[in-house]
Amino acid sequence: MTNHIDETSKHKAAKVAGFMFLFSLIGPLLNWTFVLSRLVVAENVIATGNNIMANEFQFRLGITIELIMAVGLIVLALALYVILKPINRTLALLALLLKSVEATLVAAIVLVSLIALQVLSGDTYLAILPPEQMQAPVGFLLNQHTALYAIPMVFLGLDMMLFSYLFFKSKYIPRILANFGILSFALIFIHALMFILAPQYATMPINQIIFWVPSGLFEITIGTWLLSKGIKVEQTH
């Protein structure tokens, strides 16, 4: 009876994880494409500040979506932990903790963005300095939005390599897919370190494609697989 309940829980968790894989990929992509990218002007901090002041609700919508995504990362981590803890509880717990750190860092970036917005639009701060003097430092901070994400991406690479390894050991999904996950997020980890150590190379379009496209393909594939086929529990040891 207990085993049946455990298997049912794992199947339900697989559906949740499948949905969250797709959500965690599509959500940020749409948010950046249709919301944040229209506000941030690279190499022009004044223009970024002006855009945000002129489109405050749009910016608030963008950071709200990012906060929801941070919560979504926790949901994904818990679902994967439920699925994979029978394989190796220690590694599954470590991956869960790393994913939690990732989510916390994303939430911290949202907090920084919200504070920057308050500084830019708050009457208290504008009474101290004129708007044109506030826009430059705040615009600079907001223009570093992508760079700030290099830190949580380090943890993304680590936690998903662990989860993918556990999927490989479990045989819940095809091993070739699990191997692809390990490779994909190893690339994410390397790119995140590259962004910290040599940002001029990390931001090259060709490198962004090489390092990011595989993980996107993996998330689409595993998300669709878990939603449609679930996991093959009977193949585990």
Image (cartoon, rainbow, N blue to C red):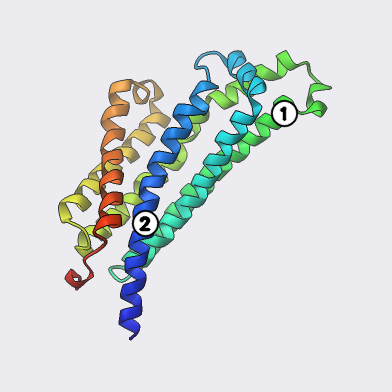
Left or right position of 48 against 198: right
Figure quadrant of residue 82: bottom left
Q: Which mark is first along the chain, 2 or 1?
A: 2
Q: Residue at x 26, y 40 (%)?
A: 217
SS class, disc 2: helix
Location of residue 143 in the rendering, given as x and y in whole percent from the top left corner: 54, 23
Q: Using the image, determine if residue 199 lies above or below residue 78.
A: above
Q: Which residue is mark 2?
A: 17
Q: Which mark is residue 205?
A: none
Location of residue 173 in the rendering, given as x and y in whole percent from the top left corner: 21, 58
Figure quadrant of residue 111: top right
Q: Which residue is mark 1?
A: 119
Q: Residue at x 65, y 35 (%)?
A: 114
Quadrant (top left/top right/bottom left/bottom right) for the N terminus: bottom left
Give 205 or 24, whichever is nearer the viewer. Answer: 24
Left or right position of 125 against 70: right
Res. 227 visible in picture: yes
Return the residue found at the far front: 228
Location of residue 55 in the rendering, given as x and y in whole percent from the top left corner: 63, 23
Question: How far apart are the two marked residues, 1 and 2, measured between alpha carbons?
Answer: 38 Å
Q: Residue at x 84, y 22 (%)?
A: 127
SS class, disc 1: helix
